[in-house]
Image (tube, coloured by chain):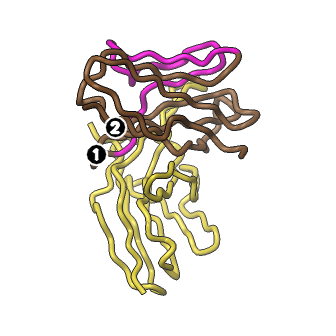
Amino acid sequence: NAGVMQNPRHLVRRRGQEARLRCSPMKGHSHVYWYRQLPEEGLKFMVYLQKENIIDESGMPKERFSAEFPKEGPSILRIQQVVRGDSAAYFCASSRDRRNEKLFFGSGTQLSVL
Amino acid sequence: DQQVKQNSPSLSVQEGRISILNCDYTNSMFDYFLWYKKYPAEGPTFLISISSIKDKNEDGRFTVFLNKSAKHLSLHIVPSQPGDSAVYFCAAWIWERGSTLGRLYFGRGTQLTVWP
């Protein structure tokens, strides 16, 4: 499967725990975007990364949220000390180039915070 | 602040008829527009796009129209098929002046139901 791979598909956490969401971009893609979709909402931009660099994190909450895209391995979106309001679908997308209008999305991770 | 707006949360159309999904935007600096289709438990998939220098783009049963003066775009699906039933998201790119750094904004989506 050469598409964008996200895991896990579903993640259940209790308040205060940490959530780690993984994203492997399409083969040949070095640009990764994370989006969050709250119930009844559209997709909201969180962060844009290139290999080993955070390019734009202006959409990410200042506290508890972090993202990385190491030289080797998948991109990771980390949420520390989760709260109920973090419950959402988190989508990762990738593109080949920096200015490439078509983003390819993964199937998402549904995070549920109890 | 919702810069890309889809004011109809749902649309129901009979099979074989035309589906028209609408999208409005507020920022005249948006210069590339896309429609994504999303089935339950899946990620959005790219459907069709249009550059701001054009007013129409067609791909098979799908046509996107752009009216820049009205800051409005629409997606026409004809003829509609039951398999088209999904949530459709309108999205728009804005690029920092003189930069390759851009941001893709999404609307809230319209649930299209095509019934036999």
For the magenta stretch, what is the residue range? A42-71
- Label 1 SS: loop
- Label 2 SS: strand
Which disc number belongs to residue A88?
2
User: Earlier along the polypeptide chain: callout 1 or callout 2?
Assistant: 1
Quarter placement of the C terminus of chain A: top left
Question: Dividing the picture into quarters, in which one does residue A93 lie?
Answer: top right
Q: Is residue A53 above or below residue A4?
A: above
Q: Is residue A65 above or below residue A104?
A: above
Q: CA distance from mark 1 to mark 2?
A: 7 Å
Is residue A53 a member of the stretch shown in magenta? yes
Question: Dividing the picture into quarters, in which one does residue A63 lie?
Answer: top left
Residue A65, x across and y down, in percent: 38, 17
Amino acid found under the numbered disc labelled 2: Ala
Is residue B96 a member of the stretch shown in magenta? no
Amino acid found under the numbered disc labelled 1: Pro
Residue B64, x across and y down, in percent: 52, 64
Which residue shows up at 59% across the image and 42% down it? A103
In this view of the protein, which residue sits in the foreground, A98 or B52? A98
Residue B91, x across and y down, in percent: 46, 47
Chain in brown? A
Which residue shows up at 49% across the image and 31% down it? A34
Chain in yellow? B
Subunit that carries the residue with mark 1: A
Q: Which residue is mark 1?
A: A39
- Does residue A102 appear to the left or right of B29 in the view shown? right
